[in-house]
């Protein structure tokens, strides 16, 4: 299932690898919502999806709660604003019109994502969206993706919160999947950035959370990430990069999937135990 937004680090392309390491549970908890590719490509009974970016969470809430009005506003915005001049007018209103209603703001965010350069999401230190015009001949309007998301989102709760607050809401029966801004890349996703100290704090909290529920983490494959995730089982995968200035059809990068289970600790994973691999296959077949 493709996603509503273009997104750096979108997990749609690596879902086959990721699904092998996501166990069954009552609820999937995602402290870093991103494009919601994992929510859209799994089948948990419930979801708790969080992100520190209020524009992202507002978009998902508006689609969930006001699907048809959102589509009407967004389609009109796409149809009436096809030039660079109109793009910058929309961006200006998005950044500096505090009276912009939440529904319209969500539609503006989708428009900026689909019409901005390579679909990047970046804010300056003042919290202003600052991606330039992408100059696309015919930007794609994700109608089918919006409708699919609206249906699936009825199982989900969306909150604007950082990972610390979100992880404090976990409970037995949850599965936690973390896809933070990667070490060495994507660190300017939001005005506050995401430093190595925050990576360290995240892993420290995940070690505590893994005492009560399974934890799965994606990140770039670096000496630093392997060091802080040393108490997890780690697998390396090669991923195509399609968003970013240097991206191209042959651009690839190494990433890791790290897993820790409450009962068996770091030894548990579907990729280093034959029994685990069989178990993962059975789980996916049953969904």
Image (cartoon, rainbow, N blue to C red):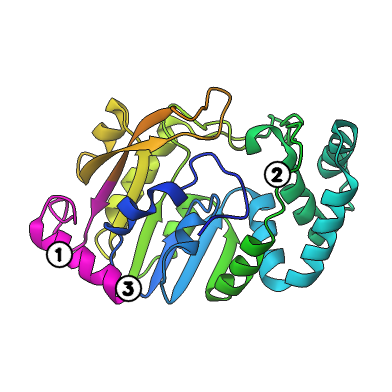
- Whether residue 19 appears in this view of the structure is yes
Q: Which mark is residue 114?
A: 2
Q: Which residue is mark 1?
A: 278
Residue 162: x and y in percent read: 53, 50
The residue that appears at 73% across and 70% down in the rendered structure is 67
**Of pointers 3 and 2, the one earlier in the residue sequence:** 2
Disc 1 secondary structure class: helix
Crowd around label 1: few <14 · some 14–19 · many ≥20 (10 Å): few
The residue that appears at 21% across and 71% down in the rendered structure is 282
Q: Is residue 162 left or right of residue 270?
A: right
The residue that appears at 51% across and 27% down in the rendered structure is 248
Residue furthest to the front = 137
The residue that appears at 22% across and 64% down in the rendered structure is 280
**Distance of label 1 from label 3 (alpha carbons):** 21 Å
Whether residue 275 is in magenta: the answer is yes
Q: Which residue is mark 3?
A: 173
Q: Nearer the viewer, residue 89 or 203?
A: 89
Q: Nearer the viewer, residue 220 or 158?
A: 220
**Distance of label 2 from label 1 (alpha carbons):** 40 Å
Residue 54: x and y in percent read: 67, 52
Residue 199: x and y in percent read: 40, 37
Whether residue 11 is in magenta: the answer is no
Residue interval drawn in magenta: 258-287
Q: Quadrant of residue 102?
A: bottom right
């Amino acid at each position: 299932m493709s996603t509503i937004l273009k997104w750096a680090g979108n997990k749609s392309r690596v879902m086959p690898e990721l699904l092998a390491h996501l166990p069954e549970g009552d609820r999937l908890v995602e402290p870093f919502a991103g494009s919601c590719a994992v929510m859209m490509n799994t089948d948990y009974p419930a979801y708790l999806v969080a992100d520190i970016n209020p524009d992202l969470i507002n978009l998902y809430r508006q689609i969930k709660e006001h699907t048809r009005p959102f589509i009407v506003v967004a389609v009109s915005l796409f149809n009436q604003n096809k030039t660079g001049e109109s793009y910058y007018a929309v961006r200006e209103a998005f950044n500096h019109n505090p009276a912009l209603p939440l529904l319209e703001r969500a539609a503006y965010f989708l428009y900026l994502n689909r019409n901005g350069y390579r679909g990047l999401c970046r804010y300056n230190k003042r919290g202003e969206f600052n991606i330039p015009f992408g100059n696309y001949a015919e930007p794609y309007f994700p109608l089918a993706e919006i409708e699919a998301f609206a249906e699936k989102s009825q199982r989900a709760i969306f909150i604007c919160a950082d990972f610390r607050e979100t992880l404090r809401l976990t409970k037995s029966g949850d599965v936690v999947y973390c896809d933070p801004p990667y070490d060495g890349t994507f660190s300017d996703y939001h005005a506050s950035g995401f430093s190595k100290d925050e990576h360290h704090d995240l892993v420290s909290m995940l070690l505590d959370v893994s005492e009560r529920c399974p934890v799965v983490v994606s990140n770039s494959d670096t000496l630093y990430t392997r060091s802080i995730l040393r108490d997890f089982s780690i697998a390396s995968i090669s991923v195509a990069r399609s968003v970013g200035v240097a991206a191209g059809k042959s651009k690839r990068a190494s990433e890791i999937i790290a897993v820790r289970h409450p009962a068996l600790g770091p030894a548990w994973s579907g990729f280093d135990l034959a029994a685990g691999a069989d178990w993962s296959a059975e789980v996916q077949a049953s969904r």
